[in-house]
Amino acid sequence: MKNSDPSLDRLLRAAGQYRPAIEQEPPFGFVTRVVAEWSAMAGGNTGSGVDARLQAMWFRRAFLCSMAVMAISVGWSFKTDTAAPNDEMAIASYDATADLP
């Protein structure tokens, strides 16, 4: 009985022969474009710096809105939890759900 699969053997042999390429330095033009873009964002010039400030403003607004929604939901939940049920059906419903495993 043959235990090995020929395609698996071929795959494993090919994986064993793989040698990673030596890392090369990026082209000079690419490096200068990246540095120019980074300095434009940091310097506040027109272009990408404006985009970064706009993104920061939207992030700040989204964060504040999410905090407001969270505070409202926590307050609403606290109000609901502290309200005493004065209805007999509510007490019976709570008793029935509290007994469930």
Image (cartoon, helix red, strand yellow):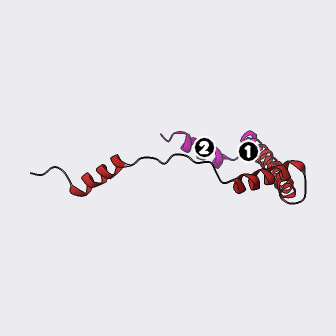
In magenta segment, residue 22: no
- Residue range (magenta): 78-101
Q: Position of residue 7 (x, y in %)?
A: 25, 57
Local packing at callout 2 (Cα closer than 10 Å; few below 14, some 14-19, many 20+) is: few
Question: Mark number for residue 35?
Answer: none
Local packing at callout 1 (Cα closer than 10 Å; few below 14, some 14-19, many 20+) is: few
Instruction: Read off the residue under disc 1.
Output: 77
Q: Left or right: where does residue 50 sit relative to residue 100? A: right
Residue at image point 72% right, 52% down: 31
**Residue toward you, 54 or 59:** 54
Q: Amino acid at mark 1?
A: Ser
Q: Position of residue 76 (x, y in %)?
A: 77, 47
**Residue toward you, 46 or 70:** 46
Q: Amino acid at mark 2?
A: Tyr
Q: Judging from the image, what secondary structure is the residue with disc 2 in?
A: helix
Residue at image point 85% right, 56% down: 54
Q: Judging from the image, what secondary structure is the residue with disc 1 in?
A: helix
**Residue toward you, 96 or 47:** 47
Q: CA distance from mark 2 to mark 1?
A: 17 Å
Instruction: Read off the residue under disc 2.
Output: 94
Residue 91 figure quarter: top right
Residue at image point 51% right, 46% down: 22
Q: Left or right: where does residue 18 sit relative to residue 81? A: left
Residue placed furthest toward the left: 1
